[in-house]
Amino acid sequence: MAEPLTASERDEYQKRGFFVRERLLGPSLVGDLREAVEGIHQQITRAALEQDSQAGAVQRVDGLRFQKLLGSTVKWEWREDSPHIRSMEPLHHLDARIDRLIEDARITQPLSDLLGCEIGPFTDKLNFKRPGGSPFPWHQDTPYWAFGCEHVDRLVSLQIYLDDATRENGCLWVIPGSHARGVLPVFSDRGTLGRLYTDLGQVEASGAAADPLAIEAPAGSAVFFSGDIVHGSQTNRTQQSRRALILTYQPAGHPRWDRGESQTS
């Protein structure tokens, strides 16, 4: 059943830049989604093997591997010998269960309330953290989306945990309240990707940074968050995978980012 946004959730989002709904999705659906993302990983792995012999199949940015496969941009794990996906975007077109989830009223209702209008999908992303999976540096989403989107201030996301998320397996970390300062300084001396990573040293020096907060929550929980909040994750130090879906929405009527589609939830 779809639950409207509560006054306390709105207040927390405005003040801290996020709020959490624990166990938003039940165990049966979470199990289906785990099956879906593992099937997608297999599809991508097969497609990558077919492309291996093609010149230029794998692109490198700051030494890290990127690849266009099956209509998705795939970022491979940092370790050169790893066969695992680090993240990919988009993926809804690769499994109907993901596509249906994007329209689930349990997700869209609170976001529609938050934006005060009908909403549609902007982009969707899958994050994998296999055992030993690498960290994700502190960053804001807004600078990444700003290329090709003129309404970044009207975007809102949620991360859905497909596994119990803990400090040990690389759960999401946020800097509460950091969204209130807009786009923050990034690194200018760490290559191409560094320009998308928040220079937390400069933020701390300005006295604007709160203590980082680990958002630990059970599988099926959702973290609703602003594109301006500084967030990241750490290495998965366990022997189990930590998988998460990130869905981003916008006011209805705009095309999906980099997909040329328009859809209303």
Image (cartoon, rainbow, N blue to C red):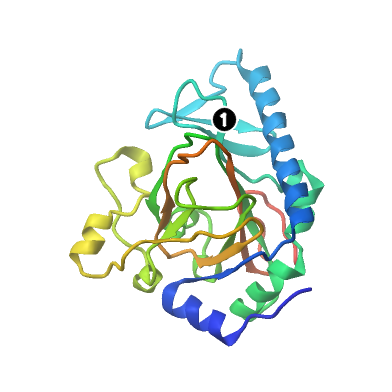
* Front residue of 236 and 150: 236
Give the image quarter of residue 85: top right
* Front residue of 15 and 249: 15
Q: At 70% across and 30% down in the image, what residue appears? A: 42
Q: Quadrant of the N terminus?
A: bottom right
Residue 119 appears in the rendering: no
Label 1: few (<14), some (14–19) or many (≥20) C-alpha neighbours in 10 Å: some
Residue with the most extreme top position = 53
Q: At 63% across and 64% down in the image, what residue appears? A: 249
Identify whether 43 is placed above or below 3.
above
> Where is residue 87 shown, x and y percent of the image?
55, 41
Residue 110 appears in the rendering: yes
Would you say 229 lies left or right of 194 here? right
Residue with the most extreme bottom position = 7
Mark 1 residue element: loop
Residue at mark 1: 84
> Where is residue 51 shown, x and y percent of the image?
64, 19
> Where is residue 154 shown, x and y percent of the image?
55, 71
Q: At 39% across and 54% down in the image, what residue appears? A: 139
Would you say 219 lies left or right of 96 here? left
> Where is residue 255 shown, x and y percent of the image?
67, 59
